Image (tube, rainbow, N blue to C red):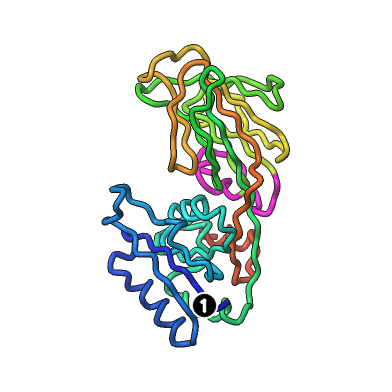
Amino acid sequence: MNTFYVITNYQKDPEFQTSGMIREYLESRGKKCYIQQCGKDCPTGQYRYTDAQKVPKDVDCVLVLGGDGTLLQAARDLVECSLPLLGINMGTLGYLAEIEHTNVCPALDKLMDDNFSVESRMMIQGTALHQGRQLLRDIALNDVVIRRNGKLRVLDFNIYVDNVFLTSYSADGIIVATPTGSTGYNLSAGGPIVAPQASLILLSAVAPHTLNSRSIVLPDDVEITIEVSARHDTDMDGAEATFDGDTSVKLNSGDRIVIARSDRKVRMIKTKNTSFLEILREKMGN
């Protein structure tokens, strides 16, 4: 690799010290490195880490400095570019960001020597519908979460798979996660951990109001429809669907969100030969 693009979470590297060090290190070895200068002064007034329009055409890979949230947003925003991403963890605990910022130089050496592999991660897409009218369509690398919006009341959901009724849930929310997202909110909700290379979709209830609720593992070629039941019929008592904790849309009684595997994939760089189980053991402190 010869040309690199750095996306920085301004809140994690406010003075761009680590970003600048990376650029100096690469340029001292004859490589080209761009740093996206987008932080608190973004013209839109909304803090964003990633702007696909600013990525030059000659870039070979993208280095994402921040935490898992930064990498998730970069993956979503750059999915059309098909550029491989390497996460550099500037936070406390990260499952997606492979490299700690204190060990970035050895990883850069491997990139420059083409000593790495690229792993494809599946994404899911969701379409929110109100009386057949599309409210929002978006993609997610981690998960789509439908949760209560407003008063602290339990939500009722009807779940359909390929238009066949599966089950109903009374819960605080529903998580539809990819294998990559299995170590995110899904894990906190008691859902199973899945190797990120797997091809499947996880369905987990958040604080279900039943004693026998279990997560459901489905093949990746199904279409899942989640319907908000008629108990809640106002904005205050409705639900909200979020995509990777970023974009969101309100849902009310009778509204549906249809979720399926996306044709798009995220390409993640691996510079280590560490297995998923070893990474999991390390993150869990065992």
- In which quadrant of the rendered image does the C terminus lie? bottom right
Give the residue drawn at x 49%, y 44%.
244
Residue 189 on the magenta span? yes
Region in magenta: 180-199
Q: Whole-percent x and y of residue 248?
A: 44, 35
| Residue 122 shown left or right of residue 68 in the figure | right
Query: Predominant secondary structure in magenta?
Result: loop
Residue 44 on the magenta span? no
| Residue 101 drawn above or below residue 175 | below
Give the residue drawn at x 64%, y 43%.
262
In the figure, residue 152 lies in which quadrant? top left
| Residue 235 shown left or right of residue 227 in the figure | left
Identify the residue under disc 1: 108
Badge 1: few (under 14), some or many (20 or more) residues near its Cα, within 10 Å? many
Q: Whole-percent x and y of residue 283?
A: 52, 59
Nearest the viewer among 52 and 76 is: 52
- In which quadrant of the rendered image does the N terminus lie? bottom right
